[in-house]
Amino acid sequence: MGKLQDKVAVITGGVSGIGAATAQLFAAEGAKLVLVDMNEEKGAAFEAELKSGGYEAVFIKADVTSEENVKNIFDITLSAFGKVDILFNNAGIGATKATEEVTFSEWRKTVAVDLDGVFLVAQAAIKEFLRAGTGVIVNTASMYGWVGAPGNAAYNAAKAGVINLTRSLGLEYAERNIRVNALCPGFIETPILGETDRDFLTNATPMKRLGKPEEMAKAVLFMASDDSSFMTGNSLIVDGGFTAQ
Ligand code: NAD
């Protein structure tokens, strides 16, 4: 029996990078998957790949910043699988620009996806979890929610917001059988890194390598499963030692 046998997991940003690696691991542990993303092409391909591996998966094209899209995610999940047990609230975008050059609309776009979207999807999941009497949320924050860095102000502020949102939700629902924790990755080799100089990121990391999406997936599995049954309102930093410096 898998650690997530017959659990239904909604994964936002679920067709790329950390979300896709987590989807693979969750499926191998027995979960049924609802993959949420804006990227329809990758979504359709990944859904087909999982199904051909014998797993149950549904892709939903949705923007986590749209209230209507978010409601739709849970309507489709309930009609496909009848319940939802786990939310991996992971969709996010990067933003690197000097503060004096950032427009207000760029700032708002980053905060909309990286903080507002996390709130919206968590809120919709919590409504279902309260009905069911149980549920687990893992939010993706970042090591940059713990430490500052130049040229990333909106992203870093949004990710720090996710960490304190996680603490607050963990406390708010602690007595109602809903656990809420956050993953704080370091530099992980995924498409979000874009053209960023890999040598620079590697050298900045004490373990002198980038993390792999599969290494994040294992930490998410811990927080999504009963292995972390006494953990809530907390954050797990998995960053090759970056924030220990
Ligand atoms: P990724 O780009 O591979 O995956 C992010 C996914 O989110 C993409 O598939 C994208 O289409 C989707 N997405 C973006 N905006 C969306 C929206 N509005 N609605 C729905 N889906 C949307 O990158 P990743 O590294 O796997 O990122 C996953 C999470 O990890 C993000 O929250 C990111 O901020 C966080 N993170 C990544 C790193 C890293 O170094 N890779 C470090 C710290 C935190």
Image (spheres, helix red, strand yellow):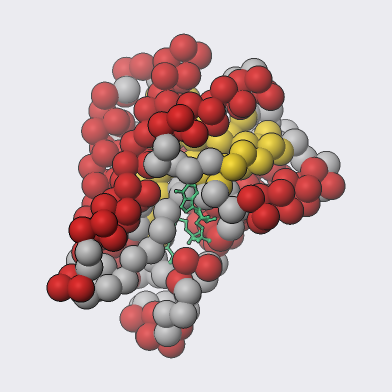
**Is residue 230 placed above or below 210 in the rendered structure?**
above
| Residue 122 appears in the picture as rendered | no
Nearest the camera: 78 or 165? Answer: 78
Task: Report the residue at 36% width, 17% height from top.
Answer: 176
Task: Report the residue at 37% width, 34% height from top.
Answer: 120
**Is residue 119 placed above or below 162 in the rendered structure?**
above
Q: Quadrant of the C terminus?
A: bottom left
| Residue extending farthest left | 100
Total marks in image: 0
**Where residue 38 appears, x then y in whole percent?**
54, 49
Nearest the camera: 220 or 17? Answer: 17
Left or right of residue 112, residue 42 in this image = right
**Is residue 141 placed above or below 95 in the rendered structure?**
above
Task: Report the residue at 50% width, 14% height from top.
Answer: 132
**Where residue 41 appears, x then y in whole percent?**
67, 55
**Where residue 139 appears, x then y in whole percent?**
40, 43
Left or right of residue 13, residue 109 in this image = left
Q: Quadrant of the N terminus?
A: top right
